[in-house]
Image (spheres, rainbow, N blue to C red):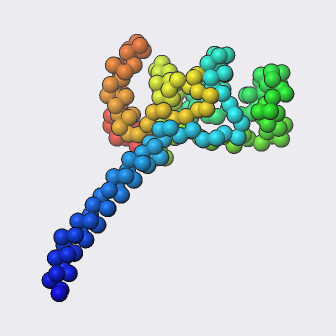
Amino acid sequence: MKKAWLDHTLKVRVPLIMMVAAGSFIATYYLSRSERDGVGYAPVQPIAFSHTLHAGTMQIDCKYCHTAVTSSRHATVPAASTCMNCHTVARKTRPEIIKLTKYYEEGVAIPWKRVHRVPDYAYFNHSAHVNKGIDCVHCHGPVQNMDVLSQIQPFTMAACLDCHRNAPTRLASIQGVKRGPENCNACHR
């Protein structure tokens, strides 16, 4: 009796458990990909903001709103006061502008939800890239065509290394661009 139970366990139960465990791991790995690398992430923002309108139709330069992008490692999210440079006059009666004006008048920061995120253990400097002539679209995609901002590139170590290793090819339109650093301490400080 004991031998039959052991044979059944070894021939049926163990392989079945192993197959379910492997299948669960594989399914979890692929289904959680977007959560791990952020591709497709497009949170609902407190104020509906169209990059298509602002960066596309109106051709407002990214640097007008993301002011620190040339001088800081962070691009910074614009304060309500930056938006109000135009919206004290333009489209003041629109529902989203009314929300914006309320944040501005109350002196409360707009609780934007961050879309693009490099892991906390990695160092990334926007200004080092922007000042080399690398345009925002190389990492953030065609933002000027996005009504709802979403992440379209993975911000993973593999993606960064691929760009650093192949910069002269991938960024051929930028004169004099060289390969980026590949040493660990360039990003892991």
Image quarter of residue 185: top left
> In this rendering, would 32 be left or right of 87?
left
Residue at 38%, 47% in the rendered image: 30
The extreme bottom residue here reads 1
Quick one: quadrant of the N terminus?
A: bottom left
Quick one: quadrant of the C terminus?
A: top left
Q: Is residue 64 visible?
A: no
* In the depicted structure, whether residue 168 falls above or below residue 29: above
Q: Camera-side residue: 61 or 22?
A: 22
Residue 146: % across, % down: 58, 27
* In the depicted structure, whether residue 45 falls above or below residue 54: below
Residue 135: % across, % down: 50, 21
Residue 61: % across, % down: 62, 19
Count of picture labels: 0
Residue at 43%, 49% in the rendered image: 32
Residue 51: % across, % down: 63, 26
Image quarter of residue 49: top right
Residue at 19%, 72% in the rendered image: 10
Q: Is residue 162 visible?
A: yes
